[in-house]
Image (spheres, grey):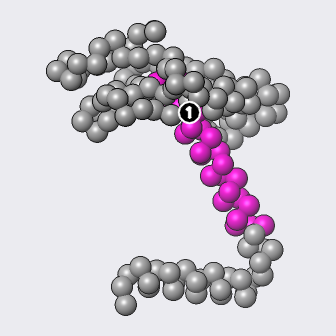
Amino acid sequence: MNQRTSIILSDIGIAGSVYLTYGFWTVFRLYLVPYLWVNHWLVLITFLQHTDPLLPHYRASKFTFPHGVLATLDRNLLVGCGLIIGWIGAHATHGISETHHLGLGIKLEGAPGGREEIYRVFKECKFVEDETNILFYKNASGLAATRPAFTDDSASDSGIEIGKI
């Protein structure tokens, strides 16, 4: 029996014993709902930090750790959505959305991560084309908000200047 089959059988055994011991609704309420809630926040924070029309994306041949760190936007999560929701965004997430990518002394800060910002980013970042080693999101009309200042592959890897179109 291969490892994949053993893992699947083990998972089925664990799920079955938990279900028989505690019942579906207890497992749903105490495990599945909190699991989905935490993952919802992690996906939202990651989406807002790494997705914006201004942020470059690099193919493997051009990606470096400094490029990855600088290609993020820290945001104040849910500021502007009310006092209690803003407090949850700032404190209950332990500041992960505001201070996650500091390290090189440069802080790029985007708009607060409220509903309007989520919608704007979702609307303006539809796809990237297979054009170069440095990519920018394009909107549904195929227009990018920014482009690399140079695209020559022989250019210095020490940094990428981003220019407005």
Is any part of residue 73 visible from this angle? no
Query: Quick check: 39 above or below 165?
Result: below
* Dot 1 crowding, Cα within 10 Å, few <14, some 14–19, many 20+: some
Question: Does the magenta run of residues contain 144?
Answer: no
Is any part of residue 25 visible from this angle? yes
Percent coordinates x, y for residue 58 in the rendering:
35, 32
Q: Quadrant of residue 104?
A: top left
Residue visible at 57% across and 24% down? Answer: 141
Residue visible at 70% across and 35% down? Answer: 89
Is 123 in front, or is 130?
A: 130
Identify residue for label 1: 126
Q: Quadrant of residue 88?
A: top right
Q: Which residues are magenta?
A: 29-55
Q: Specify whether 38 is left or right of 152.
A: right
Question: Does the magenta run of residues contain 41?
Answer: yes
User: What secondary structure is the stretch in magenta mostly built from?
Assistant: helix
Q: Secondary structure at mark 1?
A: loop
Is 56 in front, or is 138?
A: 138
Q: Amino acid at mark 1?
A: Lys
Q: Specify whether 65 is left or right of 81.
A: left
Residue visible at 39% across and 28% down? Answer: 135
